Image (tube, rainbow, N blue to C red):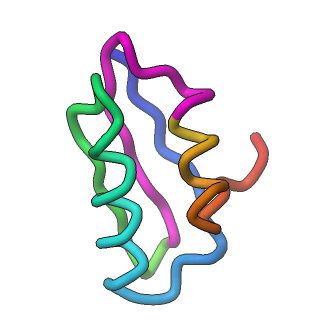
Amino acid sequence: MDRKTFQVPNIGCDGCVRTIKTEVAQIQGVKVVDGVVATKTVTVEWDAPATWQQIESTLKEIDYAPTPA
């Protein structure tokens, strides 16, 4: 299982985190999506067939792009 924690500058409230969780959880293979408003961080755990590129693309589509590493 892959796991990544990253910053999302556009997070401003619990609703933002809920949107991210809802959208990213729909990707087949994603196991865990968690976000913290105070630190503007999101943690995602996934297995194949999900990929980081797919997760990042979904986040960009919903205007919650992660900060580049």
The quarter of the picture where the N terminus appears is top left
Q: Position of residue 3 (x, y in %)?
A: 39, 28
Q: Quadrant of residue 8?
A: bottom right
Q: Is residue 32 left or right of residue 11?
A: left
Q: Position of residue 38 (x, y in %)?
A: 43, 81
Q: Is residue 45 left or right of residue 13?
A: left
Q: Is 13 covered by the magenta stretch?
A: no
Highlighted range, magenta: 40-54
Q: Is residue 31 left or right of residue 28?
A: left
| Residue sitting nearer the eye, 54 or 1 | 54
Residue at 66% in and 72% down:
9
Q: Position of residue 16 (x, y in %)?
A: 42, 78
Check the image and report above or below for 14 versus 17.
Answer: below
Q: Is residue 60 left or right of residue 42?
A: right
Residue at 35% in and 63% down:
35
Residue at 63% in and 42% down:
57
Residue at 51% in and 37% down:
55
Q: Position of residue 41 (x, y in %)?
A: 48, 61
- Count the numbered circles shown: 0
Check the image and report above or below for 40 versus 68.
Answer: below
Q: Is 53 covered by the magenta stretch?
A: yes
| Residue sitting nearer the eye, 58 or 47 | 58
Farthest residue in the bottom direction? 13
